[in-house]
Image (cartoon, rainbow, N blue to C red):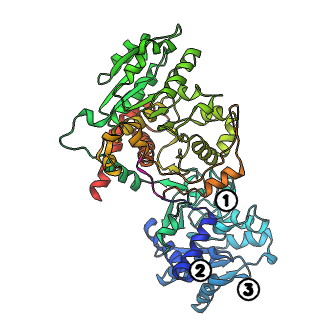
Amino acid sequence: MKVLTAAQMREVDRLTTERYGIPSLLLMENAGSGVVRAMEAHFSRLVGLKVVVCCGKGNNGGDGFVAARHLMLRDIQTKVLLFAAPGDVKGDARVNLEILLKLGASIQIVEEHDFSEESIRQLFQELDADLLVDALLGTGARLPLGGFIVTILRHIARFPKVVAIDIPSGLDCDAMRPNPGDEMAPRAEITVTFTAPKPAHVFASRDGAIRRWVVVPIGSPAELVEDPRHWLNFFSEAEAAAALRRFERRGDSHKGDYGHVLTVAGSVGKTGAACLAARSALLAGAGLVTLATPSPCLPMVAGQMLETMTEPLEATDSGGVSVKAFDYGRVETLLEKKDVLAIGPGLGGHAETVEFVRRLVQETTVPVVLDADGINAFVGQCERLNGGERILVLTPHPGEFARLLGRPTSEVQADRVSLARQFAAHHQVHLVLKGHRTVYASPSGQVFVNSTGNPGMASGGSGDVLTGILAGLLGQALHLPFWENSFPGGVEQSPGVDTLHSAQPTPGPVGPFPSQEGNQFHRSSSSQASLENSSAVTSPSSLEGVIALGVYLHGLAGDLAAKTQGEKSLIASQIVSNLPAAFLTLEALNSLA
């Protein structure tokens, strides 16, 4: 599902009218009537309620005028508050205001020159209403707001039931982090937006102004919305179910048809991370999983993992992997007939372990999922992370990503999407930046925002589970029929990485890239502009769909665990235990399709 900024949405509306001849007045009519239908679907009953529609002078107010008319046509007692001079209302909004006037609607005009704190307080104190519709500002608001509007919003926020048209007034529509405008914006029980969600919808905090949002189509052609220059996506339940349909198992298949994952993980004191990653790969559907771990850890992990094969690795004195594991070609032998390498969980930061990780990641040709201490091994060595010749998936949390960039974590959190997108394009890696609304940035320039997950997953081991899920799905994907049908010659012609890598969309001109000095990753206006013009495909490629599905399943399993365990008591092993239920949930949706 595409996510559009305010400017992109205006362009879609403009082209809908200019290119396709769909009148803007009709788009407004569809928007306002759609709001009322969404209200009917959300509230158990509207008839008998008293509704107040607060309108501004712009198109958001025009949508409110249409909504008020449709409420009146349903015999719902409706009052309109216009916070502007009627002469300031222009265009399509003016047409719909005049229709309301001709219908004899109850309209009270409050102009700014009459404004006083006391008059506004008295106005809202005397309102007799059960439900308030916020149609004041919409997505085109110029922030920060002045005293007149701020005072109005403060009083609207006291209403127990608020419906916001497009976005609660006072919020920055394009914000890609929890919105600072939440402090003044009304807490909308439901927000009805049009054509596509906006950034503020998908990145909203669950306790902020946008509690629940729905998208109402108003007639804009799909090809305008799906323009490849619209690079931000919200990976929805329907898209996850569609991606999972490709993983159907054949009746005559065997374990070798579903990939062999090699997991390199663990150290003395951190064997749990290794077990979580390996078990997750199995429950994600991998046919075979081998867990390679330092020799002192082998008895512990072997006793925990009945279905997983284990291999010992030469250990350091402290119980981590030693670079001596490469002696006599043992690592090369271990990699034979493996489809995916998952490396990092619980490895530790011993100097020899760091050198082992760097060498293994650079020398292997199979797809790699790099996490935790595997990522930390490249701090100060970012230039060695290159996914241009084979698939490289990184799954950092904000602190790990900040260390890679050589920046404070606070800077990463303030600009998560842009930094992830530029890093992925520059290094040609698939970057999954974990956190609230986990962000997956593809080398193509496309970004996918995950729609599942909860705060209970903020506990040790959750990331190890994600590593295993992604590795397990990638291992299967290499062997499933849709790969063979997608590329000339099928899987057999280009085993492992080559076939799967060809599933990536061919990126457009996304350079020159930001420069690097040491481990600093610098943004540049030229790189940002070139990313904006990327000619990547509009829907997820096969590979993008696999990775986005893995992130979705991880969050969904966490959501299912939270339903029985609560968020405070949720631990990583419960996410693993709920993976089967997550798959069944999506499969049930497919059976209904």
Q: Which is nearer the N-term, disc 2 or disc 1?
A: 2
Amino acid type, mark 1? Asp
Work out how far the residue at label 1 is from the one at label 3, CA to CA, in angstroms: 27 Å
Stretch in magenta: 538-542
Residue 90 position by quadrant:
bottom right
203 vs 295, left or right, is right
- Tell me, for residue 65, which label it has, or none: 2
Amino acid type, mark 3? Gly
Q: Which is nearer the N-term, disc 1 or disc 3?
A: 3
Percent of width and height locating residue 537: 48, 57
Of labels 2 and 1, the one closer to you: 1
> In the image, what residue occupies the spot 36% across and 52% down?
241
Marks 2 and 1 close (CB-CB < 8 Å): no
- Using the rendered image of the protein, determine whether residue 46 is visible from the camera's viewpoint: yes
- Using the rendered image of the protein, determine whether residue 563 is visible from the camera's viewpoint: no
Amino acid type, mark 2? Phe
Q: Which is nearer the N-term, disc 3 or disc 2?
A: 2
> In the image, what residue occupies the spot 42% across and 47% down?
503
Quickly name the residue at label 1: 172
Q: Is residue 151 above or below residue 416?
A: below
Of labels 1 and 3, the one closer to you: 1
- Tell me, for residue 87, which label it has, or none: 3
Helix or strand or loop: what does disc 3 sit on?
Answer: helix
Does residue 40 belong to the magenta stretch?
no
Does residue 541 belong to the magenta stretch?
yes
> Magenta-highlighted stretch: main secondary structure?
loop
Percent of width and height locating residue 75: 48, 82
- Neighbour tally class for label 3: few under 14, some 14-19, many 20 plus, Cα within 10 Å: few
- Tell me, for residue 383, which label it has, or none: none
- Neighbour tally class for label 1: few under 14, some 14-19, many 20 plus, Cα within 10 Å: many
Q: Closest to the observer: 455 or 148?
A: 455
